[in-house]
Amino acid sequence: MKNFQIVFFFISFSAFATLERDVDFLLRYAPSQDMPLPGGFVTNNCLLAARARDTAPEAYADEIYLDYVLPYSVIREERDDWRAEFRERFAPIVAGCTNAYEAAVKLDRSIWDLVGVHYDTRRDKARQSPRHSMRIGMASCTGISIILIDACRALGIPARLVGCNWTTIPGNHSWVEVWSQGRWRVLASGEKEREDSIWFLDYAAMADSARIDKRIYASRYSPSPEGTRFWRTWDYPQDVSDVPADDVTAKYVIKPRYAIIASRETLADSEWRIAAEALAAKHDNEALCTVVAATATDALATLRGLKPRYVAFLMRPEEFCTATLLELKSMMREIDDDPFDDAIWGIVTGPDAKTVQRIASSRSPNEIGSILATTGVSANVVTGDVACISDAYPKGEWWRKSSTGLRWGGKCTNEVASVFSSAWRDIDPECLLTSSHATERNLEMPFSLGNLVATNGVFATTSKLGMAHDHTPIAGPLNEKVWLAAGNCLIANHIDSSDMLMTALSFGKVNQFAGYFKETWFGFVGWNTWTYFGAMGYSLSLSHYAANQWLLKKLALGEHSDENEFAGLVWDRDATIFYGDPMHAARIKPRADAQYDTLPQIVVFPDSTRSHKVTNVPEDFMAFCADDFAIIERKK
């Protein structure tokens, strides 16, 4: 503990009782790194805090005082004795302020030149104490926030540190909240921005409450009722710090609009109406859900009025075919005037209402822990079971990896289909990743060494190609799953109730399916969907959206090397489709070796009715902004 200045007070009996409470609070919840706390330091801190509260710009409850004014530290910075000095230096700045937020803004406009500290990435470390930052004249966003919080607390203004890891671009950020007029208000410490135009609020609005590492946290001194702790932003390589915190994600995330489009005939069927209602109910707390009675391809005017972030077309199988899919692909780029997809969207369908009710109400899988692939996949994509039938030489190669890391495999040219069938049964995978030739009726194993077919409502395998051979039914799965057909033509095309798509959705318990409904030779969207999904932690629906936007940007800006690439991009633009609930965030845990320097980053703004401009992009990156999304990519 640094040397501290002792201030003498004469106190009444009631003030002594308050002092006793405050000292007990600090000692009870003090971090182990601080123990034993010097008694004189604790007493002095409590007396100065109580004095500051008495002269604060506005009153507040004891529970606010104890966690956000009384504490001598913000997170796990070095410990300084700052109260007396900060009060003496900064009290004149806030004289005459009528509320805490007004006073905090005045502090933020005035103190940085006084203390000689400014933002600089060359600072010694993220979580510096005020005196450390003042000694070297620079601090990170965290260090600057700590100074401002301590300055506020020295004047009796409740303040706390808020921060998160960004969801869609590299890095993280910390800022300040001040308790004023009965609520926590945001302050962009050291940046002199108005509360309603702070640059990082758009990024914060994209926080992901489904992921512990992508939530927004606010520091506190005592443990929260839920036992929440601040996710790492300064304690790398630790995953979670020991700093008590509140999860404040919901405060920052803007509820997006979710339009569920279904024909009047579909909604008139009670079983399909249940599916529509289940889809809306599932996302009621996270989105503004609207069920619209309209034929899918006639919904453009409605969508232009709603400007939704997500769109689900709830469609009976007889309501769509290849022509319908092509019309929808075009229509979803016409909600606004730019050439890009204007929502994250998908078709919720199935061979029967029971299947669709399952898809509409399910949140499974969430974080994917097992994969079965007919194309090369890294062994460390997921931590669980993985099986891969390779589509690279040597012909017939396969391998398996267990959740314990044990790996084995071999080459079996005559029994590849049985390898697939046994992996399907033993692993019961939560994700299928497929390539090789396919049609609406079958999926060939790599090098045509076997066949998976849809027959009589189930999947079956054979070691030979063609539909005329005897097939062995594969086991009905227990796990719900997603299927990314990254390199298969036609497998996502719908022709009747017993095709590969409908069999996957019903028998296969596939809740999300992304793939090609047309023949292709190019594969840009399919394989880049896997890039986002497998390497970067995007959900499957967002991965498909991101790959499409990347392609559309290349077309819009002429980013193609020759006419062959241009033709391939144009073809792929209208060749893939996503089936399932587009707001269901099924994800693979990001790989440790993801290479962000070679990939664009997609920023999806949750409310496209606002006007967005991306600022403060990391130094080595640049932003391409459209009406309702941005691509952040590394400078070449």
Image (spheres, grey):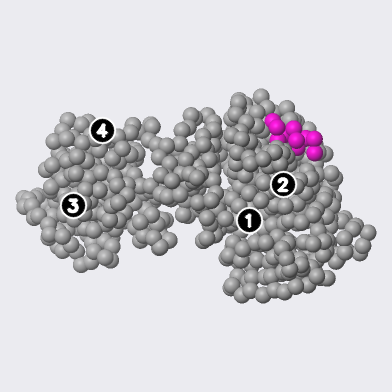
N-terminal of the pair, mark 3 or mark 1, is 3
The nearer-to-camera label among 2 and 1 is 2
Residue at 45% x, 36% y is: 614
Dot 1 crowding, Cα within 10 Å, few <14, some 14–19, many 20+: many
Q: Which residue is mark 2?
A: 522
Residue at 72% x, 57% y is: 434
N-terminal of the pair, mark 4 or mark 1, is 4
Q: Nearer the viewer, residue 382 or 397?
A: 397
Amino acid found under the numbered disc labelled 2: Phe
Dot 3 crowding, Cα within 10 Å, few <14, some 14–19, many 20+: few
Q: Secondary structure at mark 2?
A: loop
Give the vertical position of 259 relative to 135 (above or below): above
**Is the N terminus in the top left, top right, bottom left or bottom right quadrant?**
bottom left
The residue segment tinted magenta is: 322-331
N-terminal of the pair, mark 2 or mark 1, is 1
The nearer-to-camera label among 4 and 2 is 2
Q: Residue furthest front?
A: 562
Q: Which residue is mark 1?
A: 365
Horizontally, residue 71 falls left or right of residue 174, namely left
The nearer-to-camera label among 4 and 3 is 3
